[in-house]
Amino acid sequence: MVRVTRQFEGGGVPVLMITMPNGILSFKVIPGIFSADGYIHLLSENDVPFIKLNFGLRRWLQEDNSPVHKGKKVKEFIEKSGISVLKWPAKAKN
């Protein structure tokens, strides 16, 4: 029996998704290679203003465990923005 330690092999397509208060989903496909700087730009230009406008004081962001989300610059930006990040397990347990 071979057990794969990664959930997915190879590349993927980065997709940003937001669940709005009325239950509607908003998503954006991120073209090309996604970097920490690109993520910060996306958050600052689109997501942080949207989250603050629609969610009031209950500001939560849920990220997966992408290396882009774990960078020092990204963590500092999110902390300064006043948005909390929900914990996400690295891999679901069977």
Image (cartoon, helix red, strand yellow):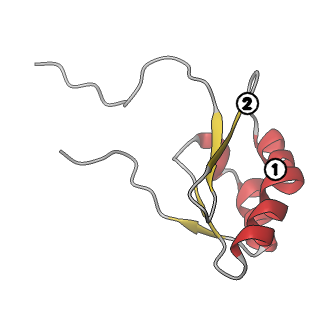
From the viewer's perspective, is 67 left or right of 4?
right
Instruction: Name the residue beneath numbered marker 2.
Output: 30
- CA gap, disc 1 and disc 2: 13 Å
On the image, the x and y values in percent for residue 62 come to 56, 58
Q: Label 2 near label 1: C-beta < 8 Å?
A: no
Amino acid under label 2?
A: Ile
Q: Residue furthest bottom?
A: 57
Instruction: Tell me where residue 65 appears, x and y as whole percent.
Output: 52, 46
Residue displayed at 77% across by 44% down: 39
Instruction: Write down the residue under mark 1.
Output: 40
Q: Position of residue 87 (x, y in %)?
A: 47, 63
Secondary element type, mark 2: loop
Question: Which of the 4 image quarters holds residue 59?
Answer: bottom right
Quadrant housing the C terminus: top left
**For the N terminus, which image quadrant?**
top left
Q: Amino acid at mark 1?
A: Ile
Identify whether 26 is placed above or below 87. above
Q: Residues within 10 Å of mark 1 (few under 14, many from 20)?
A: many
